Amino acid sequence: MKHQKNFKRLNMAGPLRMAVLRNQVISLIMNGSLTTTKARAKEARRFAERLVTLARGGNEMTLRRRAKALLPYKEEALVKLFKEIAPRYIERPGGYTRVLLLGRRMSDTAEMARIEWV
């Protein structure tokens, strides 16, 4: 049963799923957009919006440590998140990203989507 489960498993074990989502969010932060499958894009959107909400609080050490715990791989991504991306959304109450559907992939007919900043 799937009662009270608030995330998609994406057919992966927990640590692998978290690593994939972290890397996708780092790509989104560094490049501004990301093309992936629809299910992964929706989960990456949840993760990215949580990070932006955290970074909107300012450049305090506690918030940076919490963000570093979620994105431990790249310090440049955290710097860009706190200096460039989060200040754009100070007045916005939520919905920092959008998911655009791109159709189906030719090889395996997976639904593709692009996630980008609003």
Image (spheres, rainbow, N blue to C red):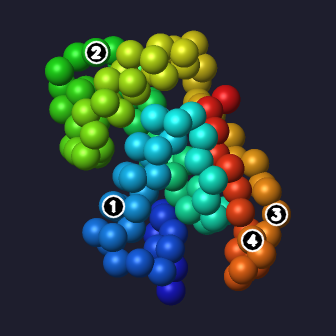
Residues at marks 2 and 4, CA–CA distance in whole angstroms: 40 Å
Mark 1: which secondary structure? helix
Q: Nearer the viewer, residue 50 or 36?
A: 36
Picture coordinates of residue 47, whole percent (x, y): 45, 48
Image quadrant assignment for residue 101: bottom right
Q: Earlier in the sequence, mark 2 or mark 4?
A: 2
* Element type at mark 4: loop
Return the residue at label 1.
19
Whole-number angstrom distance, CA of label 1 to CA of label 3: 26 Å
| Residue to which mark 4 is pinned | 105
Q: Between marks 1 and 4, how big is the CA–CA gap? A: 23 Å
Q: For mark 2, what is the residue?
A: 59
Disc 2 and disc 4 in contact, CB within 8 angstroms: no
Q: Is residue 94 visible?
A: yes
Count neighbours of disc 2 (C-alpha within 10 A) and say few if under 14, some if 14 to 19, many if 20 or more.
some
Task: Check disc 4 and give the amino acid type.
Answer: Arg
